[in-house]
Amino acid sequence: MTVVRHLLISGRVQGVGFRYSMAAQARLLGVCGWVRNRRDGSVEAMIAGDAGQIEQMLAWCHTGPAGCAVEKVSIQPGRDEFAGFEIKPTA
């Protein structure tokens, strides 16, 4: 069963390679979806996968890549179907 989660990640998460690192981690885990910067300084993502993949991806999101400082990860149920993982333009 596919689990879909909508994430808002705040803290020092822009300008530190967060989106590119998240895309690489998602592809490594086989997670589908997308990630983008937001004008308010946060990062938004939609992730889809099985429960184990989502759990691993959420654990990664709480720490992120070196150089970032994640303060909060807001998690909500999401919807949609995805093929692969993409980096979207800033919203």
Image (tube, grey):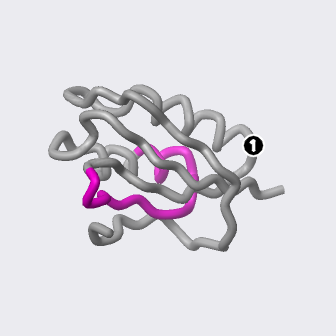
Pointer 1 local density, CA inside 10 Å: few below 14, some 14–19, many at least 20 = few
Q: Which residue is mark 1?
A: 51
User: Magenta residues?
Assistant: 25-40
Q: Is 40 on the left or on the right of 71, as rendered? A: left
- Return the residue nearer the eye: 37 or 81: 37
Image quadrant in which you'd find residue 4 = bottom right
In percent of width and height, residue 50 lies at: 73, 49
Give the residue drawn at x 32%, y 69%. Answer: 91
Q: Which secondary structure, mark 1? A: helix
Give the residue drawn at x 36%, y 50%. Answer: 43
Residue 15, compared with residue 86, is above or below; it is above
Image quadrant in which you'd find residue 71 = top left
Q: Residue furthest front?
A: 40
Q: Residue furthest right?
A: 1
Residue 33 inside the magenta-drawn segment: yes
Residue 84 inside the magenta-drawn segment: no
Look at label 1 and name its amino acid: Ala
